[in-house]
Image (cartoon, helix red, strand yellow):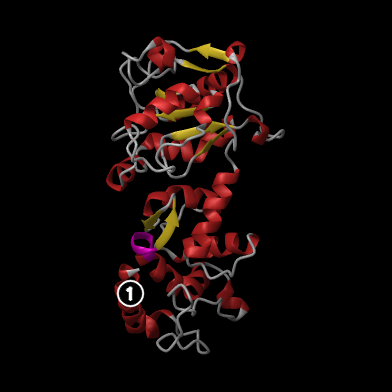
Amino acid sequence: MKKDKVFYPTVLGMIAAGFALSFGLARNENFAQAPLRPDGIPAVTRTVKASPSVESGKAAVAARFSAAALLNSGLRNTLSWPFGGRNQTGWNIYAPLIAQTIGTTASPDAPAFAAALAGWQTKRSLEPTGVLDRETMAAFVKFWQAQRLGRSGSPGDERLYTAPIDEFFDLTRSPDLLKLERETYAAYRRMIRAAAKDLAGELKVTPNGELAPDEKFLRIVSAYRSPEYQASLRRREPGAGRAALAVNSPHSTGQALDIYVGGEPVTTKDPNRLIQIKTPAYKWLVKNAHRFGFYPYFYEPWHWEYVPARLSIANPPEKE
């Protein structure tokens, strides 16, 4: 909370200095003297009513959401919020996933991003401030977590498939760790073929549209893990929190894949995750993985789960 106390007065000073320029239309909003909400964020980001002529176009969006945008530019690196038994700082790591969720390509610092966020907040029965505060971050986490498998448990040996070693990031991986659920593997292959086509200028691709043998991006880092193997991982890292190493891992279903998206393959330290979210591979997955039935564990950029029940009937996955 110490960071919050340092940040908010700084932001308020910035907004007060630019108030006359960016909020000439907001005559009924006294920003400089606005009270703080219980979570410490100024309660001044209500939508300002304007004339029909102002409501149209980018100028109207800028006028209505410039204050929210200014707050977001700071909160993306300073917002304090809880997850996994630990206090998290900022939401910059999740910016690509947030943008995809609210349906915008605008920068997180832009009024257009705040406007799209306000629309999403309305749909989630939140106050449509356009500010990504603690309550909104909690709503995102709840929404993303609800998209996942939500279960563990072995699919049975008959449903497990041993994938070729060249599909994996580590070519020395034990044969016992090359398994995944059959339908999940088929969906993964469809997805990677589409990614190779779209990212031909970014990744190494063969003439027939496959990832090149020496291309590491989008390879499988980890797939099916038996409960016994998961327990052995926890014994190696007794200090790992639930967010870092699940007790009842979805990997036991064979439908959860860790996919290489850059940096250290499965390290949750913020600097590493910031590297991962900027790669073409991760950005492609965020925008396209759902087309093939894969949904992310938001906290780990590399972790994707196959949830076939979520595949739209109107938009079936591509055929082999």
Vertical arrangement, residue 95 with respect to residue 238, above or below: below
Residue 276 in percent (x, y) is at 34, 40
The reply, left or right, for residue 101 in relation to residue 299 is right
Say what secondary structure mark 1 lies in.
Answer: helix
Q: Which of the 4 image quadrants contains residue 36? A: bottom left
Please state, as top left, top right, bottom left or bottom right, where the C terminus lies in the image. top right
The front one of 149 and 191 is 149
Vertical arrangement, residue 144 with respect to residue 165, above or below: below
The front one of 193 and 4 is 4
Residue 200 in percent (x, y) is at 39, 26
Q: Which residue is mark 1?
A: 5
The front one of 112 and 51 is 112
Magenta range:
75-79
Identify the residue shown where x is 41% and y is 65%.
Answer: 72
Identify the residue shown where x is 39% and y is 40%.
Answer: 244
The reply, left or right, for residue 76 in relation to residue 49 is left
The front one of 303 and 103 is 303
Identify the residue shown where x is 65% and y is 36%.
Answer: 310
The reply, left or right, for residue 270 in relation to residue 56 is left
The amino acid beneath tag 1 is: Lys
Residue furthest to the right: 313
Residue 173 in percent (x, y) is at 35, 15
Q: Main secondary structure of the magenta part?
A: helix
Vertical arrangement, residue 238 with respect to residue 28, above or below: above
